[in-house]
Amino acid sequence: MSRPTRGLNRRELLRNTALAGVGVYVAAGGRAFGAANEKLNIACIGVGGRGGANLGGVGGENIVALCDCDDKRAEGAFKKYPKVKKYRDFRRMLDELDKSIDAVVVSTPDHTHAHPAMTAMGMGKHLYCEKPMAHAVSEVHKMMRLAVEKKLATQLGVQRHTIGNVHRVVELIKGKAIGEVRECHAWIGGDRGMPAVPTDFPPVPPHLDWDLWLGPAKERPYSPAYCPYNWRFWWDFGTGETGNWGCHILDIPYWALDLKHVVKVSASGPPVDPQRTPKSMDVRFEFPARGDLPPLVLHWYHTKSGPPILKENDLPHPGSGVLFVGSEGMLLCEFGKRKLYPEKKFADYQPPEPTIPDSPGFYNEWIAACKGGEPATCNFDYSGPMAETVLLGNVAYRVGEAFTWDAAAVKSPDCKAIEPLINPTYRKGWPL
């Protein structure tokens, strides 16, 4: 974005441009942009790993700040943008650069999504956030509410939402190709989880600020067993494979079946470990009727062998996927493939004409929304309930009880055991 002339700050210049009658876009947060191609000022929090990919996705805009508490992890991003301001603490970054930031990208580990996200949105910054949106259900609801209150453009990192095959699956289900759907199965393959418990704790390497990395999590000594990657398999930091993959895979039935808030959850799996996420898990989500759509039971599996229903119906076993069970047949899909069953019945089936348009690009959707365009397809109104559902699956597994869920009240009326997992306690100095 062009820099303000001397004597006018950026907001004043853009406001004056608007008042002068030049064509403008007014972004959801109230910021004005002189033209659709005028660039946003974006700050990125967490720029290693997935954060590096997100940085690349928004790199066509003005990158004004990079924040990461691990200099080694962030080294590639720092070298790519040598003149951009670098920070370790997102709070300092947002405080110092408030007036020059329009939007923020958060790509930190799960346990540190909500704090920078809530801080940025509270300051009126548009937000792109990695899945599963937050570490706890109450955080998801706070983020959803604040985005609405501040009228901000949001996007959850469910990038596979743009895949053409996913669009065709949604069209088939909405077009009643397999009739009425009351049952759905979704899964991620593999057995990742339960990493080895560390037995030695070396000094914190100089490139890492361990205190900032811990953020709101309770204190513990540094170990490479947690950082930089295996954090996702420790309950204090991550959400396991259900959190890692759930939003991507459940995006397909969520979209196709107009799902929102779950009303009952139960789960099973191996014995619960208080520290580490499991190698497998089965979850049953129950959804109410939606308009003319009937109630739905959605099964989620983290499993190497695939859901039993595949073998029962002699269906192939993709490593991950979704099986819709309808009154007139079944649809089995992956992100890049789809097939209707029974094969003989659908041999001559003609699919409906495509109605879902191609995306201009997942990041471009959000950038356009920040500039006053249509909401991005995975904005928090859509993706928040999906993130809530994924996290509730973990909660049901950890407490070992089925429970009903009241999304409006953000609590279960019949299971008090889930309360500490829904509303976590944060380390001193990290209020939310």
Image: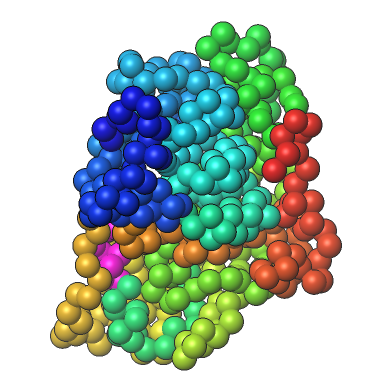
Q: Is residue 117 left or right of residue 21?
A: right
Residue 306 seen in this snapshot:
no
Q: Is residue 163 left or right of residue 278?
A: left
Q: Position of residue 205 (x, y in %)?
A: 58, 10
Compared to 408, does 234 lie above or below?
above
**Predominant SS along the magenta part:** helix
Please name whichever residue, 80 or 403, is drawn nearer the observer in this view of the structure.
80
Compared to 292, does 14 lie above or below?
above
Residue 153 falls in image quadrant: bottom left
Q: Position of residue 100 (x, y in %)?
A: 42, 32
The residue lying at 57 percent from left, 25 percent from top is 92
Compared to 165, does 133 lie above or below?
above
The residue lying at 30 percent from left, 84 percent from top is 175
Please name whichever residue, 65 or 294, is drawn nearer the observer in this view of the structure.
65
Residue 113 falls in image quadrant: top right
Which color scheme is applied? rainbow
Residue 39 lies in magenta, yes or no?
Answer: no
Please name whichever residue, 334 or 390, is drawn nearer the observer in this view of the structure.
390
Q: Quadrant of the N terminus?
A: top left
The magenta span reads 159-169
Q: Position of residue 399 (x, y in %)?
A: 76, 57
The residue lying at 58 percent from left, 33 percent from top is 231
